Image (tube, helix red, strand yellow):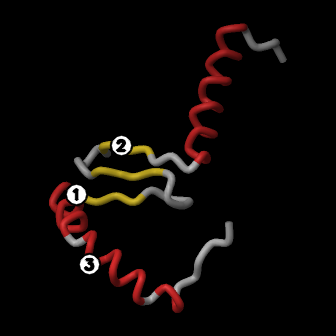
Amino acid sequence: MAEPTYEELQARIAELEKKTARRTGELDFKIGEKGGVSVYGLGRFPVTLYYEQWIRLLDTAPKLREFLEENKGKLKLKEK
């Protein structure tokens, strides 16, 4: 088996850095083939919604935040 070239190693390093960057807690957004917006970094799989769905969700953010606070005792929380 041949040794990888310098360029191949650099490409592999860049690829690995991209993957580990997501694990830092930073969210990443991408537009999919069908026009949906995907959010990476929340969990194992991306969350994908269409424009109208994101707008609807964002418009209800205060209500969602209130609901979460009211029900915090019933929710599973990640330990820090």
* Residue 26 left/right relative to 38: right
Q: How crowded is mark 2: few (under 14 residues within 10 Å), some or many (20 or more)?
A: few
Residue 60 horizontal/vertical position (percent): 22, 72
Q: Is mark 1 on a helix, strand or loop?
A: loop
| Residue at screen point 18% across, 60% down | 55
Residue placed under numbered mark 2 in the picture: 30
* Residue 59 left/right relative to 40: left
Q: Which residue lies furthest to the top in this view?
A: 6
Residue placed under numbered mark 3 in the picture: 63
Where's the C terminus, which quadrant? Answer: bottom right
Distance (Cα) linking label 1 and label 2? 12 Å
Q: Nearer the viewer, mark 3 or mark 1?
A: 3
75 versus 12 height, above or below: below
The answer to which of marks 1 and 2 sits earlier in the sequence is: 2
Image disc number at residue 50? 1
Q: What residue type is labelled 3?
A: Lys
